[in-house]
Image: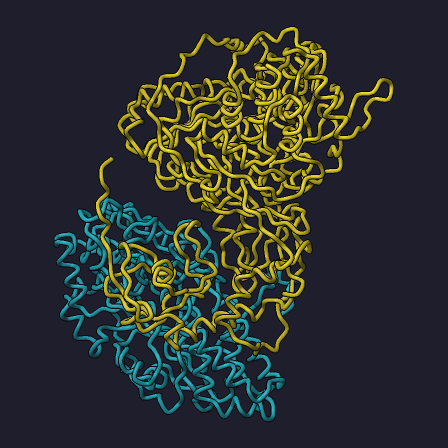
Chain colours: A cyan, B yellow
Amino acid sequence: MPELRIVLAGAEERDLTKLAAYREAGGFEALATARQQEPQQLLDALLASGLRGRGGAGFPTGRKASFIPKPDQTPKPIYLVVNADESEPGTFKDREIMYSVPHRLLEGCLITAHAIQSQNVFIYIRGEYLHEFEVLRAALDEVRGAGLLGGVTVVLHRGAGAYICGEETALLESLEGERGQPRSKPPFPAISGLYASPSLINNVETIATVPQIVAMGAEEYAKIGVENSAGTRVFSLSGNVVNGGNYELPQGTTLRELIYDVGGGIPGGRELKAIIPGGSSVPVLTADQVDTPLDFDSMAEVGSMLGSGAVIVIDDRCCMVQLGLRVAQFYMHESCGKCTPCREGTRWMVQILHGIEDGTAGQGDLDLLLDVCDRILGKCLCPLGDAAAMPVASYVDRFREEFQAHLDHGCPMRGESSLDGIFAPVDQHSHDPVADAITT
Amino acid sequence: MSSAPQPETVTLTIDGRAVEVPKGTGLVETAAFAGVEIPVFCYEPRLGPPVGACRMCLVEVEGIPKLQAGCTLTAQDGMVVRTAQTSAKAAEGQNATLEFILVNHPLDCPVCDKGGECPLQDLTFRWGPGASRMTFPKRTLEKPIPLSPAIALDRERCILCYRCTRFSENVSGDGQLVARNRGALSLITTFEDEPYSGPFTGNVTELCPVGALLPTQYRFEARPWEIQNVPTVCGLCPVGCNISVTTREGKAKRVLSRNHPEIDQGWLCDKGRFAFGHVAAEDRIREPLERVRRRGFAPLSWDAALERAEALIRGAEGRIVTALSGSETVEQAYALGKLLRAGAGAHSAVLPEATSTALDAFRAPLSTIGAAELVVVLGDEAVTDRAPIVDLWITQARRNGATVERVAGGKPPRSLTERLRASERAVLVWSGRGGGGGDRLAELAHALGFEGKPGCGAFHLPATPNARGVADAWAAAAEGTEQDPEPVSLLIVSGDEAAADPAVRAMAERAEHVLAITMYHGLAVGWSDLVLPGTSYLERDGSYVNLEGRVQRLRRATIPPVPDELAWLSQLAGRFGVEVSPHAAVVFAELSERLYEGLAYGEVGERAPLPLRTPYAAPVPATTQPVPPPPAPPGEHFLGNLRLQRYRPLFSGPAVERTPELQFQRPPAEVELAAEDADRRQIGSGDAVSVRSNGTAVELRARISRALAPGTARIAEEHAGELHLEVEVVKA
């Protein structure tokens, strides 16, 4: 399966971070086209393209944009907010988009702003993405200098290192200068978002796709991919795989094609054990599900999700309990502390998983762990709690024997297990003196 | 008044019961209306929009797959809601929330002061798991830590409902309480661990649904089954917040709000909440005292004291002046008036301050301020210093989008006058001296046409808690007109506020004799011939009239160490052939005929109603008042004198002085100066300065205030000493 570069088109051949190069490659023609069109025409095109959000939830982009009131329906300004706070473990596509095709993202911003008749764009970029920020800032300066903004204000805002700020309402809070914690919905951001004004919030990849939809036409775009999953995805392939990296492929490509044909398979002749198909927060797949196509419906059918398109390959050295522990530690560390189940539940999950891995757990602890996950699931203020509970519950569910073996005889792989390249360890609270006062 | 349009209603089903409520009603309230409890921790409508944080209120809503936080929903037509009563899923959700809350909550209920009156205990009892599945070490933290000298914070018990931080951000607006860290390590704290200070901090102890925020005064003081809560009214300012005094074995242990939605909305200031300990102060006078040659003062029996009082009154032959405090109950002032006026023909009184009946034409509940779109504050004193809760109402109005304008002096500029006249929801607040006790304000409100507008109001903030009630009661006590009492033979000082008044002290110097009714040694004892012990508002039955004109009922919460004033006034009156009942209810019945259209004592009730507006009667026009000297002309080298502005800060007075937990809130010894006045004297903020006038000098620290008018030096009463009106400020 060859790559199909749409979002990343042209970036392999030449340096598109310069405005001149981007324009030579046809950049900003779509913007000119779009500005000739009525906003409604653009909204219709977004709907017709079948584009769905690339941030993780997969909500149809055209529909989301259609929820935004028209300027004559609201006395408030309308905001476009680009979520560039890419923080899901395993996901690194947005950063590549930002540093290789920053102008495409900006062009997408301006087209989308035109579509929703907004004059104000905020790009909230993950604080650790300094290089990407600088590339984007330089690109913005160029675009501004070239007079392409057309009266639209684009603000780049750097985050301060919190995963939760990738959740759209926490992002808005943070953007407003408040503590980064999610808001209760309703009201939804489309009605009352940034500064209590109508706001459209989209992922970087989603927005960077928009110019290409305008350029090629919505119908053409809709033909790419499979039903309900139009277009391409920039898959972040990582883990125990020969050629990790970002690969833009049509949706519907199978995991096998991505891992083996594009990614070169698993190094060292080891066996495939499991696959995380959409970032750390989604349920795990087993090796025998490797032929599942990477699209929304197929992933839902096998009980997982396409999420952010981060495919993490796990080979047979990996202990699933250790994996679960590391995932749970991440979400415990990133839980904002606002709602009870996530704040308390993630910590409890970590304690139980520690016990299972250390061999101090009792026979009932697996069921307890599942029950804790179940008591978090669907009861939290925002999806973060689910993001911790879903994967861990799936590890127990799909690798129950391995968990049971831990209870019976301790970790079968202790010492042999490797999480290398799967998830980095969570460096917990080493920066916070308060942590010293707290006994975990 | 135009008849309000019928509100649009919606009909929905909760646990199978159909219920009809106005559109927009919160689901928690809707359920309560249907007789169904949706349990909550974080939900508190007074704190702003719901946050949905604690997840205690999870309910099932037909058509939505996930459980919903009931507190964040409003009633919709046709909605079908199932709470934990009928939905196993919702019950499971609530049980889960409680299990999670308890995972790290310490099991120190037996020694927790909240135990027995704790929402977490109650909800766990009803909806929670009976056993813990948590086998790991709980999160432990140093506890308790002082959030301030008045509030202890137990961070282990905290369930992070964010009520306290929302109060600090949305209600008091001080923004001092914040959450620090993330996730399970989140802690409630102040910036850099500064003490939580301000007029309203204590409210967080009442908002806290667990034993995390406790008044230090109440720690380990009582168990809920040992206490009694006495419903009464705070007597420390003219707002008259409705309070419950928690007592154990007859002693006051804490003060809680009793939430009168028109007066205080359930908020109290820290003075009203924490200063109750003044009744048990060590320097309290517990028996009558008489001046004895050479020995100073000696106690005497009550019989002897009344004998002596009778002799003083009789000996004065009507040349008596009574200085009232404005903190007496209506009944007490009436009894005093009846005794002295009917019994001794002594009609002269020094009232604590002027009052106005003209304002009754604009009577409105204080809640009118919260709903206003335009609030104009006149006068030069801080609202918080005079009537703190009024400031919260103004804050609420501002948060709801109202414009709040501050006008120094008594006359708003023309542009503002026009806006006031045009508005249906405009409020005037007079916070300062002068103004004829509200007469000038009434004239202004009348000129603006406020009579016909129920959404408009005019509030004069008196300096004393019951000035209006005292003045009216004194006037109603007997017939007869005042005759020149000079030369004064007997000065009767009724209460500590009167004793602290420099004018009263000056009169004492020329009076032949002084009879003082006072609570503490030190204030009036030195210059009195006879001292009768006074009591506190916490120790009396009776009534107060607050700044709205609302008659409210005081109940004796604690037993005073001495008979209350009404008891001995009754006996003393008997000696003059005047009948005064020792029972407040009886006295009230008598005076109510004359003052309150026969309102029955029982009808005042626990939640007093506000009397209707009366027709406007123009007050006596202002006589020419002494014009204060103009501020020194600004000149480059001329350093002229400054006009001294004394003020009584909220945290001052005898009750505050006797409350250790409030000492940190008392005003620092400083003088506020306008920037240009300070610059001209080369004084910087924090510099030591000497403030002088006519041979007196006070050493203070300078503070530069941007709000202060040039030509003024502002000093708290307790630091201003004997300074005169004009002062010189020089760098020390």
Is residue A433 visible in this depiction of the protein?
no
Q: Residue furthest right?
A: B294
Residue B710, how many percent across, how many down?
Answer: 51, 17
State whether residue B205 is above or below residue B707.
below
Q: Residue at x 54, y 74 (%)?
A: A348
Residue B32, how many percent across, how many down?
Answer: 38, 61
Image quarter where the C terminus of chain B lies is top right
Residue B271, how many percent across, how many down?
Answer: 59, 38
State whether residue A117 is above or below residue B549.
below
Q: Residue furthest front?
A: B577
Q: Residue at x 51, y 33 (%)?
A: B588
Place residue A147 in its image quadrant. Answer: top left
In front of the other: B231 or A295: B231
Q: Residue at x 36, y 30 (%)?
A: B457
In front of the other: A120 or B472: B472
Q: Is residue B106 left or right of residue A301?
A: right
Image quarter where the N terminus of chain B lies is top left
Is residue B240 visible in this depiction of the protein?
yes
Q: Residue at x 42, y 23 (%)?
A: B357
